[in-house]
Image: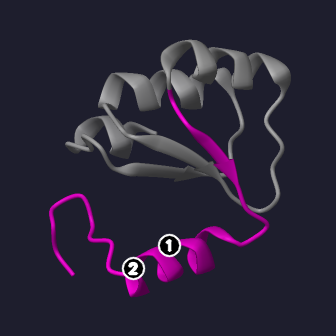
Amino acid sequence: MSDLLANFADGGVFLTGLPTVQAVRTAVVSGVGGIVFVRGKAPPDEVLELAKREGLPVLTTRLSMFVACGRLYSSGMAGHDGAR
């Protein structure tokens, strides 16, 4: 999560396997547009409630981090620095 805070992520998507309140707080501070929990991780109610209060969309996928990132990239999404 420190990588997310160290890089400008305004409007980006935060992919993580850590369904915690800290992940939501980090996403809010960094300005991302949403969180995707990978590897089928189901966030607890407190995580979903915080995300809702913050207006942060939350998605889950059974895909691994590697595959989820690869699919986003192959669909045209760029990295935080705009590189493809």
Residue 49, relative to residue 77: is it above or below? above
Whole-number angstrom distance, CA of label 2 to CA of label 1: 6 Å
Residue 30 percent across, percent down from the top left: 32, 31
Residue 71 painted magenta: yes
Q: Which amino acid type corresponds to the residue marked 2 in the rendered image?
A: Tyr
Give the residue at x 81% y 50%: 41
Residue 81 painted magenta: yes
| Residue behind mark 2 | 73
Colouring chosen for the image of the structure: one colour
Q: Which amino acid type corresponds to the residue marked 1 in the rendered image?
A: Cys
Residue 58 percent across, percent down from the top left: 62, 40
Residue 41, relative to residue 71: is it above or below? above
Q: Which residues are magenta?
A: 56-84
Tell me the SS state at disc 2: helix
> Are the residues tagged 2 and 1 within 8 Å (C-beta)?
yes
Q: Is residue 8 left or right of residue 55?
A: left
Tell me the SS state at disc 1: helix
The circle drawn on residue 69 is 1
Residue 13 percent across, percent down from the top left: 42, 51
Q: Residue furthest left?
A: 82
Q: Quadrant of the C terminus?
A: bottom left
Give the residue at x 33% y 50%: 12
Give the residue at x 15% y 61%: 81
